[in-house]
Image: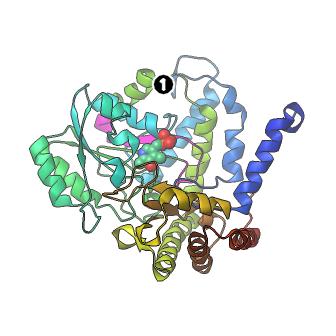
Amino acid sequence: MFVENVDPQISVLIGKERLRQMEGLEMIPSENYASKAVLEALGSVFNNKYSEGYPRKRYYGGNEFVDEMEELAISRAKQLFGAEHVNVQPYSGSPANLAVYFAFLKPGDKFMGLTLSHGGHLTHGHPVNFSGMLYQPVPYSVDPKTELLDYEAIRKLAQQEKPKFILSGYTAYPRAVDFRQFKEIGEEVGAISFADISHIAGLCAAGVHENPVPYFDVVTTTTHKTLRGPRGAVIMCKEVHAKALDKAVFPGLQGGPHDHANAAKAVAFQEALQPSFKEYAKQIVKNSRALADELMAQGFRLVAGGTDTHLLLVDLRNKNVSGKEAELVLEGVGVYCNKNTVPYDPRPPMDPSGIRLGTPALTTRGMKESEMKEVGRIIAKAVASKDDTAAKKRLREDVRSLCKDFLFY
Ligand SMILES: *Cc1c(COP(=O)(O)O)cnc(C)c1O
């Protein structure tokens, strides 16, 4: 029986969501379109299995094929990132990070992470998150003028505070991260090097962004962002930390692994090992640079002056529109993005000064630089016509017709 027969209401909603995804421009930088192969593995009979433990050491019978599948997922992730040890079981990015805290810190221990309003993630020490409640975060900031990471300031703070680990890798930082600097600073102060490459993992795997995995103590990443896999995460680390991290994931935090998700991770890693994925990752960055150029030509100010990655942060203060208004107007014309703080934002987080845009999903659809110019013009026009219903209607049609040439599902 298919969903259509069993549950027409959900079936209709799935259909509507598919149409929304195809008729709009998905520009939330953490989103992507997973392949049909990934979705097929995700909807497979591996969903039905319980397999607490690790390959060849399970607490349940009947795991011979799960073991083979998980071993394949692990060996492909190792090859893709040059990792010594990989755990593919974390349910998602936040639980993966929680496992790292659990493995390396005791409650009250100090660590450093980038403040959320400058591009860090909730799990990097925000006061409303476990990471800020159970431990003692020492937040670092970007430079107020350049809006870039200031490695000398980070080094000074680390020398002063002596954190257990220094967390790098971000949610809303448009420029390249110098992971080697973080590694050096960590060595100088005796801190563990920990990167969360959730956003840029696809770029790291393809060699388009510096990949910290071979020389960092521990690296976490989600599998559903630029990596284009199922929702989920992996932890990669040096062999010396393998036992502690595996124990933190299971039995420390999780029960049975999501075998269907792990099968889909294996498929995504296989796809990412193909030469075409390198081209894809290169095109993501070319596209975000083309979009950045067009937006700047249209008078937008970009945080940190542009991008080296898949994402850009637009500061809307000179456009007399808030991030929240812009998100809403763009949604109305079929362009999906999210409101976002800019560094040192004078406005509140629920209605900040900026929006965050990304190119991974559009690049998956096959769009290139010339389409990015068009998208940049549409965004500029939409923001300028926030009170002009007729203009917005025309823009909605422009978006639809652009999307028609780039169907994915
Ligand atoms: C997306 C993200 C996460 C969290 O992932 P979830 O799967 O949403 O829990 C963690 N860290 C960073 C840097 C992220 O961008």
Q: Quadrant of residue 70?
A: top right
The one of 47 and 167 positioned closer to us in this rendering:
167
| Quadrant the N terminus occupies | top right
On screen, 48 above or below 27? above
Q: Secondary structure at mark 1?
A: loop
Q: Which residue is mark 1?
A: 254
Q: Position of residue 360 (x, y in %)?
A: 56, 62
Q: Amino acid at mark 1?
A: Gln
- Looking at the rendering, the stretch of residues picked out in magenta corresponds to 224-242
Q: Name the spot of residue 47 as percent of width and height, x first.
A: 67, 30
Residue reaching furthest bottom?
Answer: 297
Q: Nearer the viewer, residue 191 or 78?
A: 191
Q: At x 38% / y 34%, what residue is drawn?
A: 129
The magenta stretch spans residue 233:
yes
Report if residue 169 is visible in the image.
no
* Nearer to me, 316 or 120: 316
Q: Nearer the viewer, residue 276 or 194?
A: 194
Quarter of the image where one finds residue 389: bottom right
The response on whether ligand 1 sits within 8 Å of label 1 is: no
Q: Residue furthest front?
A: 387
User: In the image, what residue occupies the spot 55% across and 42% down?
Assistant: 72
Circle 1 crowding by C-alpha within 10 Å: few under 14, some 14–19, many from 20: some
Asked whether, in this view, residue 175 is left or right of residue 355, the answer is: left
| Res. 144 in view | yes
Magenta segment includes 209: no
Give residue 86's position: percent from left, percent from top.
43, 40
* Relative to 267, residue 243 above or below: above
Instruction: Tell me: 31 left or right of 162.
Output: right
Q: Where is residue 393 shown, x and y percent of the image? A: 73, 69
- Is 405 left or right of 315, judged from the image as shown? right
Residue at 30% x, 57% y is 344
